[in-house]
Image (cartoon, helix red, strand yellow):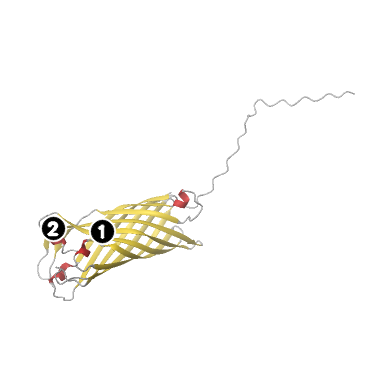
Amino acid sequence: PPRVASAAPVPDRDAPAVSATREPAEPPRAGPLFAISAVTDIGFRQFSFNYRSKDDPAAEHNDREAGQVLTGALVEVWPATLFHLGMLPGLAVYGRFQIGVNPQRVTMQSKTGPAVATSLSTSWRSLEISARHRWMIGGLGTVEADGGYVDDRYQFTSDNPLTGDAELATVPDVGYQAVRIGARGSLLLGPLEPYVTAENRVVISSGSLSKRYKFGTSVNGVRAALGAALHLGPLEVRAEGNVSLYTWSFRHDTTDPDQAENGSDAIEQVGLTVGYVY
């Protein structure tokens, strides 16, 4: 018998004309993109001049400062993650700026007489631009190498134009501009990360104090720190204690007003950093 061809299937009018497919999920980032932190430090300074004669009246020029507060901000960027470079995910570039918020009046104290008020006030400031690379050691800890430029100023200002210059010539007014080279090691204990840091500072400029001596000066610095960071999701809280030590050598002439042979500048700080990491 003759065969009848079957009719073509009628398309479903309710079916969508175009079907959508789900895009694959983006792979997780290799690390953070940037961090913004508030930084506060409380500093203590002891500058000691060493003279050939202990009876030299200029030996009273030693300086002690306590409770200096520096506050500011730190910004850190991970360029490999930010620009999808696919290499050096542990590389970070950061900048920090802090300014002193509690200038303190300076008094002169001799061995025999009472303290004498001056026109001077303390003035601190700190700037740093650095880069660091961080390597993970399994899940147990990290090792970092870092370096950059730092400008730490422990200076004085005067509100009396008549006596200010003479008084400034008796205090250790310095501005340490230096190249810093350092390393840091840390342990990973869950959200807690204790660490220790050591660095050398090659001083390239040291401010007003270096200009007092006819034949020049030389100065070198080192720094060490001990602290811990607490990671709470995107929030990071870090507490740290550190000490910087600069050693001076003075090459004076017999006509120079100051005859110190050498000196040391010790700056101790305790600080707190609170930041947001994205």
| Image quadrant where residue 145 sits | bottom left
* Whether residue 271 is situated above or below residue 264 in the rendered picture: above
Question: Do tag 2 and tag 1 residues touch (Cβ < 8 Å)?
Answer: no
Measured as percent of width and height from the top left, residue 231 is found at: 42, 55
Q: Residue at x 40, y 58 (%)?
A: 229
Element type at marker 1? strand
* Whether residue 41 is situated above or below residue 4 in the rendered picture: below
Dot 1: within a 10 Å radius of its alpha carbon, few (fewer than 14), some, or many (20 or more) residues? Answer: many
Q: Which of 273/264 is in front?
A: 264
Q: Which of 232/86 is in front?
A: 86
* Whether residue 53 is situated above or below residue 103 in the rendered picture: below
Residue 164, disc:
2
- The quadrant of the image that shows the N terminus is top right
Dot 2: within a 10 Å radius of its alpha carbon, few (fewer than 14), some, or many (20 or more) residues? Answer: some
Q: Residue furthest front?
A: 215
Q: Residue at x 50, y 54 (%)?
A: 87
Q: Residue furthest bottom?
A: 53
Residue picked out by circle 1: 153
Amino acid identity at mark 2: Gly
Measured as percent of width and height from the top left, residue 68 is found at: 24, 58
Measured as percent of width and height from the top left, residue 72 is found at: 30, 52
Q: Residue at x 47, y 61 (%)?
A: 135
| Image quadrant where residue 109 sits | bottom left
- Total numbered labels: 2
Earlier sequence position, callout 2 versus callout 1? 1
Amino acid identity at mark 1: Arg
Element type at marker 2? helix
Q: Which of 175/159 is in front?
A: 175
Q: Is residue 15 left or right of residue 161?
A: right
Measured as percent of width and height from the top left, residue 253 is found at: 17, 71
Distance CA(mark 2)–CA(mark 1): 18 Å
